[in-house]
Amino acid sequence: MSQMETGEYYSQILNEQSSYIENLASELEPEQQYGVESALRQLRDDEIPLSQQLPSSMSRKERREIIKGYYSTKLDGAERLKEYIQTLVEE
């Protein structure tokens, strides 16, 4: 399976965004940092990766589309979190 079909590609992007967000959050108050860390854990961590939850009978195209949609939502959430932190840092 390709990295697109397993979600590794998107997971790597999400991890890079998470690192950037963690660096931004280092300027916040401790309780705000905790909230950011909690939100990042929810975005990043999956008990069971989505690729392992999909049936093996699914076509490669369907698998890629589902994984792309799943991670697009997570990446969008990370982007909104980053924007929120930037507003807090600017205050």
Image (spheres, helix red, strand yellow):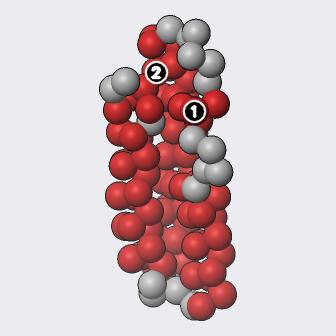
Mark 1 or 2: the one toward you? 1
Few, some or many residues within 10 Å of mark 1 (<14, 14–19, 20+): few
Q: Quadrant of residue 41?
A: bottom right
Tell me if I can see residue 87 in this picture. no
Q: Which element is circle 1 on?
A: helix
Mark 1 or 2, nearer chain start: 1
Q: Which element is circle 2 on?
A: helix
Residue at the limit of the structure toward the bottom, as seen here? 30
Left or right: 61 as drawn, with respect to 73: left
Residue 38 locus on image (x, y percent): 64, 70
Give the CA separation, mark 1 to mark 2: 13 Å
Residue 32 locus on image (x, y percent): 62, 82
Q: Residue at x 38, y 29 (%)?
A: 4
Residue designated by label 1 = 52
Residue designated by label 2 = 64
- 69 or 48: nearer the eye? 48
Q: Amino acid at mark 2?
A: Arg
In this picture, is 40 found above or below 33?
Answer: above
In this picture, is 10 found above or below 34?
Answer: above
Q: Residue at x 35, y 58 (%)?
A: 16
Tell me if I can see residue 82 in this picture. yes
Q: Residue at x 63, y 81 (%)?
A: 34
Left or right: 46 as drawn, with respect to 1: right
Few, some or many residues within 10 Å of mark 2 (<14, 14–19, 20+): some
Q: Residue at x 54, y 77 (%)?
A: 88
